[in-house]
Amino acid sequence: MHSNIYNEGHFAKTADWGESKNWFFENLKVHFRVTGCKSDPPIVLIHGFGASCDHWRYNAEIFAAEGFRIYGIDLIGFGKSEQNLLCRTNNLDNQFWADQLASFLDEIVDIKRNGKAILIGNSLGALTAITILSQRPELIKTVIAAPLPEPVFINPIKPLFPNWIKKIKRFLIKLFFNLFPLKPLINLISNTKLITFALQSAYFKSISDDNSLKRIVTVPAKRPYAAKALRSMCIGMSNRKSSAKGPSIIANIQDLPNRPPILLIWGKEDKLIPIFLAKKLIKLHPWLKLTVINNAGHCLHDELPNHFNQIVLKWLKNLKTSKQPI
């Protein structure tokens, strides 16, 4: 217990930005950070898998200094947000997180008062951002996906399996993850050098000496209900309906009458979602815009923040001077 308190305190000194606050979504505690002037246009930062709003440590204050009100949200199951779901939701997936984000935009960001939000998401956060965009486009000014996961959306796949096979598949997935020893695995990774190996796959440069980054991931993983939350994510993401997957989401956005612009930012050295998939994606959907950052991996906003921040600010400046004012 004492070591966890120490870790969180030390971690706060290295990754804090803005003001830390809590809010409730469906009786589940949600942690978020906020910085910048209340009257400035809102940007919401949405972290990737295993991370939290603290992962925007090199971006949030820079954007705030450039005239934006910055919110960073911890999705349910991550960071300091609720992990003990108490059967209030059986599964965690991008549809659930999109609902969480929509309520956050309505209640905390207050779109009606402050104008449409700019969403910037890393990986899973980007998937959550396009999910809400496809369903609540009136809330969104633009989405910056850095990068966008689920390469399956490049060529839409229509499932041809009968319902009884789908039900068996869902049952087997649920059974597998309920039996799989996730807690010992999480403990092993978060308490050994395996965490460095796991994180390195998302970065191009070495992160072996980045203790702040390791704490961003390991502190939430050491919370009592981390394994329970991860199990809900594994089951939820594996058993999603086709409407919650990339092909349907992209198709829905493409057909929007007043489609908000989407910018994709990709690390050229991304080992998790290789750059060739991004190029295939924009070839299939030329209305998407792509910018590539050299010498960057999957977490490019954290690895090369100066370059990333400049690209984002240039995109937002161009939007401001276009026919679609922020």
Image (cartoon, rainbow, N blue to C red):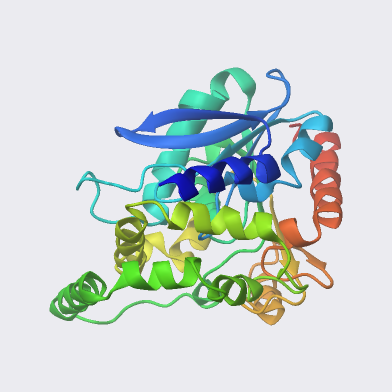
Q: On the image, which quarter does residue 268 sit in?
A: bottom right
Residue 293 showing in the rendered view = yes
Looking at the image, residue 179 sits to the left or right of residue 123; the answer is left
Q: Position of residue 153 (x, y in %)?
A: 51, 72
Which of 58 and 223 lies nearest the eye of the viewer? 223
Q: State the residue at coordinates (42%, 48%).
A: 97
Residue 76 locus on image (x, y percent): 40, 46
The residue furthest front is: 2
Residue 260 % position (x, y): 64, 45
- Residue 232 on image: x %, y %: 30, 59
Any part of residue 259 in sight? no
Which residue sits at x=62%, y=57%? 122
The image quadrant that residue 206 belongs to is bottom right
Q: Nearer the viewer, residue 149 or 18?
A: 18
Quarter of the image that includes the C terminus = top right
What residue is rendered at 55% in x and 58% in y?
A: 217
Above or below — where is 319 with respect to 213? above
Q: Viewed as shown, does residue 99 lie left or right of 12? A: left
Q: Is residue 128 left or right of residue 232?
A: right
